[in-house]
Amino acid sequence: MPLDEGKRASVVAMVRQEVGRNEIARAVGVSPTTVTRIAKDERLSFDRSKTAQATQVVSIDAKARRKALGSRLLSDMEEARLRLAQEEQARGFAAVAQGLDALSRSYANLAKLDGPDTSEMNEMKSAMGAFMELAKAVAETQENPFEKSGADAARRDLTDS
């Protein structure tokens, strides 16, 4: 069924007044697709600057939330690192090391989203290298790495990092 000429004229007038597509559709009682088709038929276009600005604001907000989440993940990693240094049981050590590994992977994935500022991520990777070596030793031997020779040095390395 063809569109009523009165509705068509209303759509055209509202597009010329730079009313948004969805707002026009609601006001006239047609679908947004119909509004777009009418505008295209009349060689009219919509002002996309408001959409671009809104998208930019959403992007900036998301980046700020990711940064805050990254800071919380780093705090959680620090707490897990301290727990790892205090853990005396092999099973508990392995569990904390697994949690620390999961946190570090989450942080690394989050850091990839916002690009080249990797200073915090490189710091985290450096600290994780030592932790993962200890975790592998626990997994392979199922012994507490602090009971082996050099246990005091290993404990100091964990608490000083």
Image (cartoon, rainbow, N blue to C red):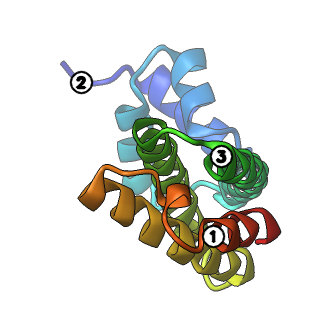
The residue singled out by tag 2 in the image is 2
Q: Residues within 10 Å of mark 3 (few under 14, many from 20)?
A: some
Asked if labels 1 and 2 touch by Cβ distance under 8 angstroms, the answer is: no
2 or 1: mark nearer the eye: 1
Sequence-first disc among 1 and 3: 3
Asked if labels 2 and 3 touch by Cβ distance under 8 angstroms, the answer is: no
Residue 158 appears at what percent x and percent y?
69, 65
What is the spatial separation of the Cα atoms under label 3 and label 2, in whole angstroms?
A: 67 Å
Looking at the image, which is closer to me, 102 or 27? 102
The residue singled out by tag 1 in the image is 154
Dividing the picture into quadrants, the one containing residue 59 is: bottom right
Dividing the picture into quadrants, the one containing residue 15 is: top right
Looking at the image, which is closer to me, 143 or 120? 143
- Name the residue rendered at 81%, 70% in the picture: 160
Regarding residue 44, the answer to whether it shows in the image is no
- The quadrant of the picture occupied by the N terminus is top left
User: Please, is residue 9 above or below residue 133 in the view?
Assistant: above
The amino acid beneath tag 3 is: Ala
1 relative to 56 in the view: left or right: left
- Name the residue rendered at 42%, 20% in the picture: 30
The amino acid beneath tag 1 is: Ala
Question: How many numbered markers are drawn?
Answer: 3
1 or 3: mark nearer the eye: 1
Sequence-first disc among 2 and 1: 2
The residue singled out by tag 3 in the image is 80
Sequence-first disc among 3 and 2: 2
- Name the residue rendered at 44%, 39% in the picture: 95
41 relative to 8 in the view: left or right: left
6 relative to 141 in the view: left or right: right
What is the spatial separation of the Cα atoms under label 1 and label 3, in whole angstroms?
A: 16 Å
Say what secondary structure mark 2 lies in.
loop
Say what secondary structure mark 1 lies in.
helix
